[in-house]
Amino acid sequence: GAVVSQHPSWVICKSGTSVKIECRSLDFQATTMFWYRQFPKQSLMLMATSNEGSKATYEQGVEKDKFLINHASLTLSTLTVTSAHPEDSSFYICSARADRANYGYTFGSGTRLTVV
Amino acid sequence: LAKTTQPISMDSYEGQEVNITCSHNNIATNDYITWYQQFPSQGPRFIIQGYKTKVTNEVASLFIPADRKSSTLSLPRVSLSDTAVYYCLLRELVFGTGTRLLVSP
C-alpha cells in the first residue's frame, strides 16, 4: 500500500529558532501533499496544500511566512516552522494520495513539536 | 463547507459490535463518505469509503441510506486496540470533531 513517511517524529526547539519537518511518499509520487496541525484533544486542521513545483496554497488564517512549505520533488514536501514560539507547539501531520489508490489519503505518522 | 456531525464519545466492551453514526445533511452529489481512525500521537488511518448502500472490507462495514444524509460505521467485535478517535469525512481534507471510542475489558 501507499506509505507516507514523516520525519522527525518529535522535536524540541527553543523559541525563535526554526524547525523543518519532512514528508516523503515512499512508494508513489505525489504531486500534491497536505499539511495539518492538531492541538491536544482537537481535530485535524488543514494548514496548506503543497504543490510540486509551485507555491503552496494556505488556508485562511495560516501565516505563509511563518509556515514555509517547499515541494521540490514528487516525493518530498517540507514544512518549516520559522521563528517558533511556544504557541506553535502542536502535532503536525502530512498526507498524500497515490493516484492508484481508490481508498482515501495516506497520512504520515506525525511530528510532535514542542517549543520551549 | 461540508459539515458532519458525530457523537463526541462512545463506550463499548470487548467483543461487542459498535456502530458510529455520522450525519451529513448537506452532502453533495459527488461527495464520497470516508472514515478514518486515529490513535494518540499518530496520523489518521483510512478505514473505509463508500458512496451509497453498503460497503464492507476486512475491518469494518459502512451503511449508507438512500438519501445519503447519514452513514454508519460498523465495527464488528471490537477489541481494546480499537480504542481510538473515528472521523467521518465528506471532503477528504476536512475533518470534523470525530468520535472518541473507548473499549473496555
Image: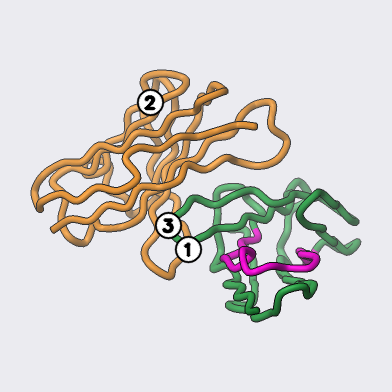
Chain colours: A orange, B green
Q: Could you tell me which quadrant the C terminus of chain A lies in? A: bottom left
Q: Which of B88 and B105 is in front in this view?
A: B105
Residue B81 lies left or right of residue A34; in this view the side is right
- Residue at (69, 79) in percent of width and height: B12
Q: Where is residue A13 in the image (x, y as percent from the top left)?
A: 15, 49
Q: Name the residue under label 1.
A: A43
Q: Is residue A22 above or below residue B24?
A: above
**Tag 1: Cα neighbours inside 10 Å, few (<14), some, or many (≥20)?**
some
Q: Name the residue under label 2.
A: A71
Q: Is residue B81 magenta?
A: yes
Q: Mark 3 points at which residue?
A: B41
Q: What stretch is highlighted in magenta?
A: B69-88
Q: Which of B79 and A7 is in front in this view?
A: B79
Q: Which callout, 2 or 1, points at the residue further toward the start of the chain?
A: 1
- Residue at (42, 49) in percent of width and height: A36
Mark 2 in CB contact with mark 1 (< 8 angstroms): no
- Residue at (89, 55) in percent of width and height: B54
Residue A60 lies left or right of residue A18; in this view the side is right
Determine whether the residue tagged by mark 3 lies in a helix, strand or loop: loop
Residue B56 lies left or right of residue A105; in this view the side is right
